[in-house]
Amino acid sequence: MSKDGIENLYALSNGIQNIIKYQEIKKTELGKVFDIKLSNNNLNFIYSDFRNLLGYHILIYYNGTKEFCAKDRCVKEYNDYIPDKNFAAEILLLFKASVIECGMPYLIGDKVIRISFDEYYTNARSVFFYQNIFELDRLTRSEFSDMDFFLRFSMDVGEPGYYYLIFKSVESLDLAAKTGKVEEITNFVNSLCRCHDKLEIFENYKVVPFVSDKETLQNNGEVMGIMRNNPDFTTW
């Protein structure tokens, strides 16, 4: 069976891209069985995923606002967490047991399956902005048509993070800052994020953008990186 076929066979959920696009976490039967086994081993998590990313991976998404515990091992940071070999082996045994319980063949053999943990809300917000930055830009510039700016997706997360608020000139940025427009734009973008947020990834959270101007970003050599991360935009 091809690698894509194995990825589909052992799918645990609809994946982070579809979760954000359709605003719903859907778990496969294998995913439900595997999640139960993880829960029974004291893992505080939201969902898991099986992916072929230059090799097989089991991704477990945890809630960074709570303590994520695995027996005596806990994660409190938002950084990706890679389990030690013994812990990874335990999780892999749970996965194999889940495959067997579902009456499915285990076709991976002795190939390596990497186990990793990602913070769910941080990843979910990043995917949301990647998928929706074009529409967020259009709606926001329409709302503030008297201002000279645009929005772009950022690979960075946190505060500030997720997106750039870029003004066409230093002067237009200074004017927006002095008149409170930067804060108004930020609040408007947050209202758009919460508008259809069935997953509640923006509940009690305010996204704070990187605020800059075109000249500064050009002088810092950041333009090409921003353009690569925003393929829907053909102009700068």
Image (spheres, rainbow, N blue to C red):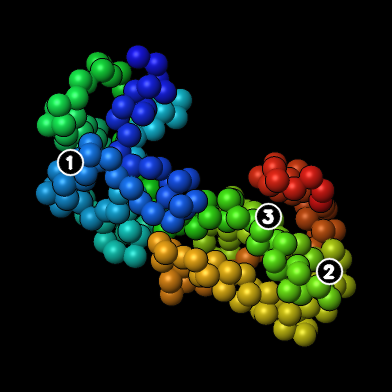
Q: Are marks 2 and 3 in contact (CB under 8 Å)?
A: no
Q: Position of residue 214 (x, y in %)?
A: 82, 58
Q: Earlier in the sequence, mark 1 or mark 2?
A: 1
Distance from the alpha carbon under mark 3 to that under mark 1: 38 Å
Asked if 82 appears above or below 157 in the picture, the reply is above
Q: Are marks 3 and 1 in contact (CB under 8 Å)?
A: no
The amino acid type, in three-letter code, at marker 2 is Asp
- Residue drawn at (73%, 80%) of the image: 181
In the rendering, which numbered label is found on residue 94? none
Q: Is residue 196 in view? A: yes
The amino acid type, in three-letter code, at marker 1 is Val
Q: 10 Å neighbourhood of mark 3: few (<14), some, or many (≥20)?
A: some
Would you say 50 lies left or right of 154 here? left
Asked if 21 appears above or below 199 in the picture, the reply is above
In the rendering, which numbered label is found on residue 134? 3
Q: Position of residue 188 (x, y in %)?
A: 63, 75
Q: How many dots with numbers?
A: 3
The amino acid type, in three-letter code, at marker 3 is Phe
- Residue drawn at (20%, 20%) of the image: 105
Circle 2: element type: loop
Which of the pair 130/222 is nearer the observer? Answer: 130
- Residue drawn at (36%, 29%) of the image: 8
Which of the pair 9/206 is nearer the observer? Answer: 9
The residue that mark 2 highlights is 148
Which of the pair 18/220 is nearer the observer? Answer: 18
Tag nearer the camera, 1 or 2? 1
**Within the image, what quadrant is residue 121 found in?**
bottom left
**Within the image, what quadrant is residue 172 found in?**
bottom right
- Residue drawn at (30%, 54%) of the image: 46
The residue that mark 1 highlights is 33
